């Protein structure tokens, strides 16, 4: 699992690549720490190269969302494949997040 954070145009983009499963969750959580300092900047989870997400991965996305909203940030998910979109729909995440 690889996580890259890029900043441009008042937006933080977290590029997620590989399998966001329980084994990768701890390392990914550390990599996502800059998103907790967004302070009004929009956050985008770019899932174009994400192959799989487990409940541990969903927990990480939700933690970022809960931290960002009170600070005035919008959190978006982009580039999800059909399998991940299905997981997001089954867990109700499609009602929590905005999609690009």
Image (cartoon, rainbow, N blue to C red):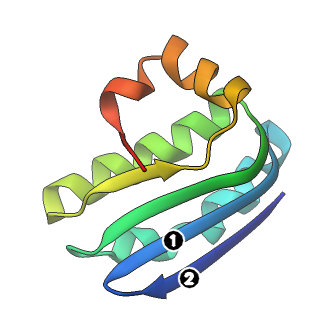
The structure residue drawn at horizontal position 62% and vertical position 41%, both measured from the top left corner, is: 80
The structure residue drawn at horizontal position 36% and vertical position 39%, both measured from the top left corner, is: 97
Residues at badges 1 and 2 in contact (C-beta under 8 Å)?
A: yes
Front in this rendered view, residue 70 or 74: 74
How far across and how far down the image is residue 100, in percent? 43, 50
Front in this rendered view, residue 64 or 92: 92
Q: Quadrant of residue 22?
A: top right
Q: Is residue 81 above or below residue 39?
A: above
Left or right of residue 31, residue 91 in this image: left
The residue tagged 1 is 13
Front in this rendered view, residue 59 or 74: 74
Left or right of residue 7, residue 50 in this image: right
Q: Is residue 87 above or below residue 97?
A: above
Left or right of residue 92, residue 87 in this image: right
The structure residue drawn at horizontal position 69% and vertical position 27%, both measured from the top left corner, is: 82
What element does badge 1 sit on? strand
Q: How crowded is the residue under tag 2: few (<14 C-alpha within 10 Å), some, or many (20+)? A: few
Q: Is residue 68 above or below residue 37?
A: above
Image quadrant occupied by the N terminus: bottom right
Q: Is residue 80 above or below residue 35?
A: above
Residue at the farthest bottom position = 8
What element does badge 2 sit on? strand
The structure residue drawn at horizontal position 64% and vertical position 27%, both measured from the top left corner, is: 55
Q: How crowded is the residue under tag 1: few (<14 C-alpha within 10 Å), some, or many (20+)? A: many
How far across and how far down the image is residue 15, in percent? 65, 65
Between the C-alphas of marks 1 and 2, the distance is 5 Å
How far across and how far down the image is residue 68, in percent? 28, 59
The residue tagged 2 is 6
């Amino acid at each position: 699992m690889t996580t890259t954070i890029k900043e441009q145009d008042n937006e933080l983009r977290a590029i997620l690549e590989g399998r966001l499963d329980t084994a990768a969750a701890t390392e990914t959580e550390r990599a996502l720490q800059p998103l907790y300092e967004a302070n009004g900047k929009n956050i985008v989870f770019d899932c174009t190269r994400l192959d799989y997400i487990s409940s541990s991965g969903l927990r990480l996305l939700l933690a970022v969302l809960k931290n960002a909203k009170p600070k005035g940030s919008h959190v978006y998910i982009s580039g999800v494949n059909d399998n991940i979109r299905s997981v997001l729909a089954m867990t109700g995440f499609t009602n929590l997040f905005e999609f690009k």
